[in-house]
Image: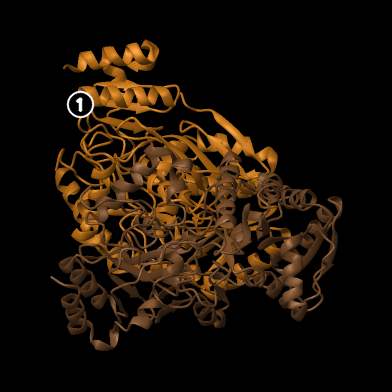
Chain colours: A orange, B brown
Amino acid sequence: MSVAQAIEALRRELGAENVITGPEDLLCYSFDATPDLPEGKPDVVVTPENTGQVVKVVKIARQYGLPVYPRGSGTNLSGGTVPIKGGIVLTTVKMNRIIEVDPSNLTATVQPGVIIQDLNDAVAPYGLIYPPDPGTVATATMGGSVAECSGGLRGLKYGVTRHYVMGVEVVLADGEVVRYGGKTVKNVTGYDMVRLFVGSEGTLGIITEIIVRLIPAPEARESILAGFGSLADAGNAVVGIIEKKVIPATMEIMDRVTVETVENFAHVGLPTDVAAVLLIEVDGIPEVVKSEAAIVREIIAKNNGWVKTAASEAERDGLWAARRAALPALARRKPTTILEDATVPRSKITEMLLAVEEIGKRHNLIIGTFGHAGDGNLHPTILADGRNAEEMERVRAAVDEIFRAALSLGGTLTGEHGIGMAKMRFLPWEMGDAGVKVLRRIKQALDPDNLLNPGKMVECAKGE
Amino acid sequence: MSVAQAIEALRRELGAENVITGPEDLLCYSFDATPDLPEGKPDVVVTPENTGQVVKVVKIARQYGLPVYPRGSGTNLSGGTVPIKGGIVLTTVKMNRIIEVDPSNLTATVQPGVIIQDLNDAVAPYGLIYPPDPGTVATATMGGSVAECSGGLRGLKYGVTRHYVMGVEVVLADGEVVRYGGKTVKNVTGYDMVRLFVGSEGTLGIITEIIVRLIPAPEARESILAGFGSLADAGNAVVGIIEKKVIPATMEIMDRVTVETVENFAHVGLPTDVAAVLLIEVDGIPEVVKSEAAIVREIIAKNNGWVKTAASEAERDGLWAARRAALPALARRKPTTILEDATVPRSKITEMLLAVEEIGKRHNLIIGTFGHAGDGNLHPTILADGRNAEEMERVRAAVDEIFRAALSLGGTLTGEHGIGMAKMRFLPWEMGDAGVKVLRRIKQALDPDNLLNPGKMVECAKGE
């Protein structure tokens, strides 16, 4: 049975318009946003239009023994969507319908190809928001962000994707369609299958419909920029604010390297004579915003920081655009950008910031660190040149040490980017061999032939 | 190999003081709080003092082929802790240490035997709370409530247990000890094993340590009692409040049967000439409380309700004591109390209330309905006499119909009590045979010999 026959079957079942085989087109699906990883060219890309067509793809894949890689917009940062073993890339772009917004139940039901921002635009007229807010909110799909359990800027106060997914429809590896969860706030029927599929990186099933929880949009907000002369002062301010029982919607950090780079790139008036800035937003009803902002300013002052409050919405938007420019700005400085997301308990953020700085110095690397300080979720970003083999060796050694540091501080390998291919080999460092074995058993229980996104998260030989 | 030898091995490894075999003592572990279910006498009850002893129990159980039933305080309402196939009941009562309260990270680390209220008492001096709030908060253990994913009165605003568990240590069926999650707000390392163990009802592993998230205690609160002349008015008020973007901390309902029974029992001054009352509490900073309470009163009036606001803390406490007395008060009226927790999307609450009323009338049964109206999580409570076989037949028929009604309204079999033994046969109604098959595969992947709490949630023949 040949790949050509499989493609023929796909054309027959999905229509030629949903089957892509042009060599240049296939190339576009051979990588995602992750650097320094092997690529893999798919044999074919399919764009199913509904759940029934997804079932057909899975059945054809089984018949011809071809792997299936579910894919949204490919903004993945751990190599999760790379078709490393050839086969079929299944992109959800054509399943992009917002099926329902239900303001009585504070829910929305979407197909996986819906862009996160489009969902937010659709619920805004109801005074509602969908809080998960990854940096790629304007391009990433709901399906991809659910499969990766995206985090983002508002995790501290509002939680991450797993806190908002209430129900899923999934096509399993055997082609069966299952639905778990629904629109009820409470549901303990069976194991928590909804959360098992959230963050499963396309390895357990293909998510074809998603019910999410929405929340009322905050009435007011205030953005505060704070500058610090030392990393430690910035880290201590983060801890101090939480200890005062103030939970800002976002509490972002950018270190000197990042601030300088962003300012050179975007010219938004960031101070460049600082060791770090914090960008903090509190939200809620106006009275809450006022009292919390006052406490934030007090703690910043106590930790030797200076404060600037956004005087207008335009100024606020400028500050946040600057923060969102951190990664693209850093990426312009050198050809290869290695973005990590090792994450520590909030109280350890100062230690982690200093550890990353020390690791960068010791390996003679430029590391810009920014990220979600309130979550202890830092993005140390190593700027390098993939063509320089010696430098890339130092990069890899530094990445290893960053993970070691995070784990030794009680942290985790990945706060929001996932394991994918990039972090598979580190898994036992965090959960031990016994812990990884359980993951592998779950993968084998749901996908015994290793058909779905093989080579990601846990390695499973066929029939192992 | 005999049970006597297994008991001997347990005595040797755990000490005689942790091995209970007296027939009267064993009897106490043959049932839980669930009525109308088969009982099962254990061969032995063990009270391990630490994780190492739990491992020993699991290994001895494997060696002698005896099932192990993890158990907290036995407040379970779906038969989840009944040792239906004999063997070893493992109670966590002696593992009741609060290991750490960490105000910087807003976490607490506890052993499974800690009583939920004791955790709340321990974190109160830090101005923190652990929000999950089942009715049995003063007796239920953390381990039991995590294994069942308890909900309770504050689910609407604050979520349920799965939203607060950040990390677990678990003894697996093969005796391996694994740890997943930790103190980081964000963690996407591997599948969401933390959430898989939350709500797994002791069937996948024995939870021996739990890290939970805490939140700042609200500064102020206001309790409002509302009476309605019809069930529909009460249900519509619930939906109306949420549509106004007010999310109360709790929004409880009691129907006429429940209100009359509670008032006769507790004499707290509840009105008895109503079709239903709502008991609503809003909380937050004082300004929020004031503005949200005003909206709540407005919506109640619009739905033909009258309002009484608790004028003092004592009056407030009286109202909530009345609500918490609903189940014990109902339970006094007849010998057998069948408490269900079929749950519907919030917008369907009026339809569900009316459906339950109609089902009760048709089967000539007394049903008192109370519960967490804001969550769509109702507790229709059937008052019957287990010795009356004919009546119990009608009870079972009514329960079936209540589940059918909930599912047809887009709801779920169980909002917070779990599947256990009581609802196993209904599982396919909600998730289909394909959905149940996945649960069974997960059980078999983690516990291939069906050693842990067998006969609960999904039936798995040994070696199936």
The residue positioned 49% from the left and 32% from the top of the image is A111
Q: Residue beneath label 1, please?
A: A65
| Residue B417 in view (yes/no) | yes
- Relative to the observer, which residue lies in front, B272 or B39? B39
Q: Quadrant of residue A464?
A: top left
Q: Position of residue B341 (x, y in %)?
A: 57, 56
Q: Position of residue B267 (x, y in %)?
A: 77, 77
Q: Quadrant of residue B323?
A: bottom right
What secondary structure is found at the residue carrying circle 1?
loop
> Label 1: how many residues lie within 10 Å, few (<14), some (14-19) or many (20+)?
some
The residue positioned 26% from the left and 44% from the top of the image is A445
- B114 sits to left or right of B124: left
| Residue A276 in view (yes/no) | no
Q: Position of residue B429 (x, y in %)?
A: 48, 41
Q: Quadrant of residue B201?
A: bottom left
- B128 sits to left or right of A149: right
The amino acid beneath tag 1 is Gly
The residue positioned 33% from the left and 23% from the top of the image is A57
Chain on which label 1 sits: A
User: Does A41 appear above or below A290?
Assistant: above
- Relative to the observer, which residue lies in front, A382 or A455? A455
User: Does B290 appear above or below A217?
Assistant: below
Total marks shown come to 1
User: Does B70 appear above or below B398?
Assistant: below
What quarter of the picture does the N terminus of chain A occupy? top left
- Relative to the observer, which residue lies in front, B1 or B77? B1
- Relative to the observer, which residue lies in front, A204 or A97? A204
Residue reaching furthest bottom? Answer: B17
User: Does A249 appear above or below A57?
Assistant: below
The residue positioned 44% from the left and 61% from the top of the image is B185
Q: Position of residue A409 (x, y in %)?
A: 32, 69
